[in-house]
């Protein structure tokens, strides 16, 4: 196992300058103007031969330098620096000895985590503050192995599982991190639950039309029976059901004992991951970013519709047509589901494999309904292509769907959380009213490559009309 690696990504003429001119003082006030002494380090950095890299470039360098399956931290030996804007705040105690920097105050595209030995950092690195980090002599890697949270730290440590980055010491932080005099208004990036991915970790985002789950009425942000963190379910109405996302709150948060709001509205926070690194979550900077005073939404009432077709795969997939266009793996049934069983597809066999496999419904007669919609649920595990969803009104019912029938691809919400099982996600209500009065086939197309092969469980397919 490698304990560190060397950045050799830029050919830059090294320049030495006295670190005594780079050290900030320990004034943790939030200045409107930075004094000469405090700003000396930033001025020296910007006047040096160091080159600026974007946050996205820095993360890509780490991923490029790390061997697949290794992901050991990378030691930065070239004169480069990164600039970002503070998207997290420990003012309420919900973050601890860490912060996230994103690449723009508005419409950000990438963010990175920074860990250091300092509490109440909001006094110095306040929300929206422009911060520069001199990367030479620091490490870029993961604080916990394979959690996909790329982090800037000051050292490394190794155990039986591998090597991770550790906090910058207070002296490293003072010598390497420089705030400018600029604090910007942070405009949250609008996202949907299904649209969140690991690429969004560290970004300050906003969800609209959300509410806390019905069974949380009367509860608080933190469960006093927990030791460290409490997960609360956020939900949005999605057709006949809900789409869910997790809000996590630390026991140390100053708002831990506040009651959860009971209305519908919007919430803003930072996309992070659970301590184990297997689930994407939202973490609040402050409850000032929670505005849920509106009327709660309710899913569509299925009783208003006629069920034309439904299948929870309780008898397997024998009613469906499977077509294997590529690869040795095929659609099958698993003893897991929502509830069990469900349809199942996995393109991994002693490694990721190339696959293209179709699961096609039986003919569905829409001659007696209008305003037809359908929906389904998915549970994704491991990285890989999402399921593609299609419908056809002229498929013959057998044969290669690539050459038989005209297929229209549909927009659907696919489980965005590939890091954990049982994150069942409703597809949302999908309009196929253009097929009203005809016979329709619904198809799910699975693809994988030798680089990535996700596992999918599919359940509760239903077609309804008025």
Image (cartoon, rainbow, N blue to C red):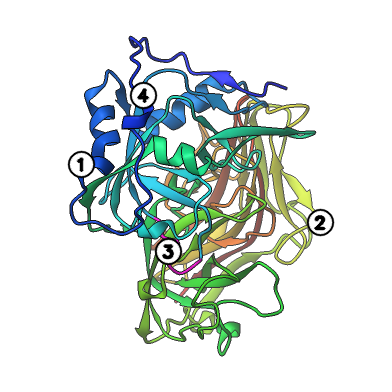
Q: Is 101 displayed left or right of 425 in the figure?
A: left
Kindly state the secondary structure of the residue where label 3 is placed: loop
Q: Nearer the viewer, mark 3 or mark 2?
A: 2
Q: Are marks 1 and 4 in contact (CB under 8 Å)?
A: no
Q: Which residue is mark 3?
A: 437
**Number of labelled discs?**
4
Q: Which numbered dot is residue 402?
A: none
Kindly state the secondary structure of the residue where label 2 is placed: loop
Vertically, is 326 above or below 427?
above
> Closer to the N terminus: mark 1 or mark 2?
1
Q: Nearer the viewer, mark 1 or mark 2?
A: 1
Q: Indicate the position of residue 357 as horizontal and vertical percent values.
A: 63, 36
Q: Which residue is mark 4?
A: 80
Q: Is residue 404 visible?
A: yes
Which residue is located at x 46 percent, y 13 percent? 8
Q: Which numbered dot is residue 36?
A: 1
Which residue is located at x 23 percent, y 32 percent? 43
> Closer to the N terminus: mark 1 or mark 4?
1
Q: Are marks 3 and 1 in contact (CB under 8 Å)?
A: no
């Amino acid at each position: 196992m490698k304990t560190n690696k060397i950045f050799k990504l830029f050919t830059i003429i090294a320049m030495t300058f006295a670190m005594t001119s780079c050290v900030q003082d320990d004034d943790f006030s939030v200045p409107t103007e930075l004094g000469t002494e405090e700003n000396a380090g930033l001025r020296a950095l910007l006047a040096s031969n160091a080159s600026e890299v974007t946050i996205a470039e820095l993360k890509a360098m780490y991923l490029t330098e790390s061997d697949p399956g290794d992901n050991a931290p990378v030691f930065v030996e070239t004169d480069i620096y990164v600039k970002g804007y503070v998207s997290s705040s420990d003012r309420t105690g919900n973050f601890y000895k860490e912060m996230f920097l994103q690449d723009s105050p508005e419409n950000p595209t990438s963010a990175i985590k920074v860990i250091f030995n300092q509490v109440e950092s909001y006094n110095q690195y306040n929300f929206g503050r422009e911060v520069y980090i001199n990367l030479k002599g620091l490490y870029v890697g993961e604080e916990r192995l394979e959690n996909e949270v790329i982090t800037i730290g000051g050292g490394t440590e190794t155990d039986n599982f591998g090597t991770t980055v550790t906090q910058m010491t207070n002296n490293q932080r003072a010598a390497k991190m420089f705030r400018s005099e600029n604090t910007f208004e942070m405009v949250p990036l609008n996202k949907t639950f299904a649209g969140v991915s690991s690429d969004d970790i560290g970004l300050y985002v906003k969800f609209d039309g959300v509410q806390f789950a019905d069974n949380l009425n009367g509860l608080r942000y933190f469960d006093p029976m927990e030791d460290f963190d409490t997960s609360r379910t956020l939900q949005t109405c999605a057709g006949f059901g809900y789409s869910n996302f997790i809000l996590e709150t630390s026991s140390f948060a100053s708002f831990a004992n506040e009651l959860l709001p009971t209305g519908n509205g919007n919430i803003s926070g930072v996309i992070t991951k659970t301590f184990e690194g297997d689930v994407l979550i939202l973490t609040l900077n402050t409850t000032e970013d929670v505005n849920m005073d509106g009327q709660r939404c309710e899913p569509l009432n299925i009783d208003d519709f006629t069920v034309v077709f439904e299948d929870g795969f309780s008898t397997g997939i024998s009613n469906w047509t499977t077509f294997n266009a590529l690869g040795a793996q095929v659609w099958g049934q698993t003893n897991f589901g929502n509830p069990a069983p469900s349809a199942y597809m996995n393109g991994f066999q002693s490694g990721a494999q190339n696959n293209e496999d179709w699961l096609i419904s039986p003919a569905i007669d829409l001659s007696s309904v209008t305003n037809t919609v359908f929906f389904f649920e998915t549970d994704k595990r491991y990285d890989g292509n999402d399921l593609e969803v299609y419908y056809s009104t002229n498929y013959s019912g057998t044969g290669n769907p690539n050459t038989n029938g005209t297929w229209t691809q549909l927009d659907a919400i696919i489980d965005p959380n590939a890091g954990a099982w049982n994150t069942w996600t409703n597809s949302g209500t999908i309009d196929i009213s253009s097929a009203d009065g005809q016979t329709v086939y619904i198809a799910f197309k699975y693809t994988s490559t030798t680089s990535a092969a996700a596992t999918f469980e599919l359940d509760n397919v239903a077609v309804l009309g008025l």
